Image: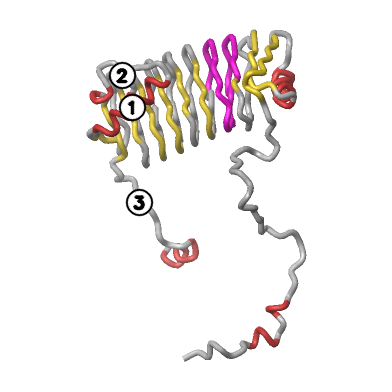
Amino acid sequence: MANLGGQHKSHDMGLHQEQLSGRTQQIFFSPEESDNFVYPESFEVDFANRAEFDAGEMTIGQVNLKIRELMQAGHGHIVIKNPLAKHSLGVGILNRLNLEFEGSLGYFGCGLIDGPNVRVHGRVGWSFGENMMAGTAVVEKNAGSTFGAAIRGGDLVCKGDVGSRTGIDQKGGTIIVGGRSGAFSGFMMQRGRMIILGDAGINLGDSMYDGTIYVGGKIDSLGVDAVPAEITDLEADWLERKLSAHGLKAPNGAKNLQKIVAGKKLWNYDNLEPTEKKIVL
């Protein structure tokens, strides 16, 4: 049996007294501090403090910089008039904020956001809300393809129709489509929930690994390893509450939505390490 009380050779070598240089990764928290779930560089804003500006003659960079300047000044409600379908507006906002666009956006609007509540009184182009982390983003009209690509959290809502590949590579959160969704919606979905109140195009949920898709209309076809499942009463109750929060209803009631999940036949994982593969091959 090992001599647990004895001194190991490493002690004689001074390894236990070695002082490591450089910055420590250890962080200490005071128990008296209140919870703080905001980014260190985020701004303190007042939601009652409203500001608006006209983006018609501004460049994309100027619009996004103006949003940041207004947040820094404490404005918690910002209204942008005449966005004129410019691309990449409202991206990278890591702050609590009520943000409204009075008009339509182009491609990649409001991507990489974590915290704001966004409302677009118009249409949006490709990849609106991509990589969204938290908050809400509501589009009053239609949206382009790859709506909500790779989102991780929050509620992303389009009250009209959306294009193909909705929620591609979705990793969390909830995507709600008030109308129809195009082909390959939920492609390679990994987690989260997608609610389509209208019809869904071909190959719905193709190659999905996890997550749940609910459809209120007709499904043209299911993708590889996407299979039907039964909705529970608990799910139906959650669906009704989630939809009502955004002023929406399932066409025939939440209980009658079609539920699609992963069949898990694609859950094949290789346990061999790269070096072991070389030996085998």
Residue 148, visible in the rendered structure: yes
Is the Cβ of the residue at disc 2 closer than 8 Å to that at disc 1? yes
The reply, left or right, for residue 158 in relation to residue 109 is: left
User: Residue drawn 58% across and 20% down?
Assistant: 107
How far across and down, in percent of the image, does residue 36 sit? 61, 41
Q: Height in image: 13 above or below 236?
A: below
Give the class, few, some or many, for how many residues have Cα within 10 Å of label 1's Cα (few <14, many ≥20). Answer: many
Q: Is residue 114 magenta?
A: yes
Query: Marks 3 and 2, how far apart in space?
Result: 35 Å
Q: Give the SS element for disc 3.
A: loop
The segment highlighted magenta reads 99-126
**Identity, as a three-letter code, of the amino acid under mark 1:** Leu
Hey, which quadrant is residue 91 in on the image?
Answer: top right
Query: Marks 3 and 1, how far apart in space?
Result: 31 Å
Q: Nearer the viewer, residue 258 or 126?
A: 258
**Identity, as a three-letter code, of the amino acid under mark 3:** Asn
User: Residue drawn 61% across and 44% down?
Assistant: 34
**Identity, as a three-letter code, of the amino acid under mark 2:** Ala
User: Residue drawn 47% across and 27% down?
Assistant: 155
Q: Give the SS element for disc 1.
A: helix
From the image, tell me which residue sits under label 3: 268
